Image (tube, helix red, strand yellow):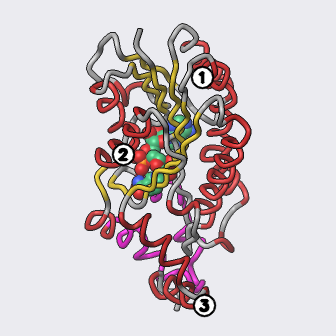
Amino acid sequence: MRNWVLITGCSTGIGQALVPLCRGAGWGVVATARNLASLADLPPGEDLRILALDVTNTASIAAAAAGCAGLRLKALVNNAGYGQVGPLECLRPEELRAQFETNVIGLQSMTNIFLPLLRREPGARILQVASMLGRLSIPLAGPYNASKHAVVALTETLRLEVGREVAVVLVEPGAIKTAFRDTLAKVWGDLPERVRGTRYEAIIVGYLAQRKGQAERFAMGAEACASRMLTALNANHPPRRVVIGWDAFWVGKLKAILPAAWWERLLRMAYGLG
Ligand SMILES: NC(=O)c1ccc[n+]([C@@H]2O[C@H](COP(=O)([O-])OP(=O)(O)OC[C@H]3O[C@@H](n4cnc5c(N)ncnc54)[C@H](OP(=O)(O)O)[C@@H]3O)[C@@H](O)[C@H]2O)c1
C-alpha cells in the first residue's frame, strides 16, 4: 500500500514541479487544480489521481476529501496561492478579501477538511507554503505580505494544537521562477489607471518588468524548490521550517541585525520610494 500526498495548485510552478518528484520517490499523488485541462499532460499511472479543486470553494474541497477517503493520505501540501500587489492606499477591500480567501482561508479550510483523513496515518504531515514575505514586508505588496504573515501565524498555531499527531511544516521560499509574476499582472486589473497622478504612477509603470527581470536573474528554479519540499515530505522527523533560497535565508538575517530605520531606508530605495 503506497502513501499518498495531495497537492493544491498543480497547474503551474512549484505544485507542478512537485508532482513528478513525489511520484519518482514512490508517493501516490493526488494532483489538483482549478482547471483540470492544466493537468492533462501528466503521465497516467496507478500512483496518480487527478481532482478539480478550488481552495476558495468549500464544496470543491469537500468533494476532493470524499475522493481521497479510500487512500492512505499521509501528506497535504497547501501550495495554492497568488500575489495581489499595489499600494495599500489604492487597494480595494474586495482585492484584500480575495487575497485572504485564497492564501489564508482556503489554506485553513483545506487543512480542516483533510485533518480527519491525515490523522488516520501515523507520521502524517502538512506542508504549508508561506513565503519569506511571511516574516518581513516589502512595499507595494501589502495584501500578499499580510496573507503570508497570516499563514505563518496559522501554521505556528496549528503546530501547537495538532503537531503531536500530524507534523506541520512551514515552507518559506524566496524568489522562485514560476508563473507567479505573470499572475501578478493578471490580478492587478486597473491598478495602473488607479495610481495615475499619484506618487506611485512612475513606480508601477516599471514594477512588473523589474520584478520579472530580477526573478529571471536571481530566482531559484521550481524543481529545486520542490526538491527541498520533497525532503520534508520524506523525512522521518519533519522539520518545523524549510527556508528555501539564499534570499529567504539572508534577507531575514539582514532584517534582524539592521537598525529598523536602515532597513526601511533600504527598502524605500529599492522600490523607488526614497
Ligand atoms: N514564485 C515565488 O517566487 C514564490 C515565493 C514564495 C512563495 N511562493 C508561494 O508558492 C506557492 C505556489 O506559487 P508558484 O510560485 O508556484 O506560482 P504559480 O506558478 O502561479 O502557481 C500558483 C498555483 O496556485 C493555484 N491557485 C491559485 N488560486 C487557487 C485557488 N483558488 N484554488 C486552487 N488553486 C489555486 C494556481 O492555479 P491556476 O492556474 O488555476 O491559477 C497555480 O496552480 C504560492 O502559495 C506562492 O505564494 C511563491
Mark-to-mark CA distance, 2 and 1: 22 Å
Residue 146 visible to an observer of this rendering: yes
Q: Nearer the viewer, residue 225 or 92?
A: 225
* Identity of the residue drawn at 44% across and 18% down: 3
On the image, numbered disc 3 is attached to which residue? 261
State the image coordinates of residue 204 (x, y, percent, origin top left): 48, 75
Residue 6 belongs to magenta span? no
State the image coordinates of residue 20 (x, y, percent, origin top left): 29, 30
The span shown in magenta is: 183-212
* Identity of the residue drawn at 66% across and 66% down: 91
Q: How many marks?
A: 3
Mark-to-mark CA distance, 3 and 2: 34 Å
Task: Note whether 73 is above or below 273 in the view shown.
Answer: above
On the image, numbered disc 1 is attached to which residue? 118
Label 3 SS: helix
On the image, numbered disc 2 is attached to which residue? 228
State the image coordinates of residue 189 (x, y, percent, origin top left): 54, 58
Chief secondary structure of the magenta portion = helix
211 relative position to 198: left or right: left
Residue 208 belongs to magenta span? yes
Which badge, 1 or 3, comes first in the chain's sequence? 1
Which badge, 2 or 1, comes first in the chain's sequence? 1
Amino acid type at image mark 1: Leu
Q: Nearer the viewer, residue 165 or 2?
A: 165
For marks 1 and 3, give the one nearer the viewer: 1
Amino acid type at image mark 3: Ala
Residue 181 visible to an observer of this rendering: no
Amino acid type at image mark 2: Arg
Task: Note whether 168 is above or below 74 in the view shown.
Answer: below
Which badge, 3 or 2, comes first in the chain's sequence? 2
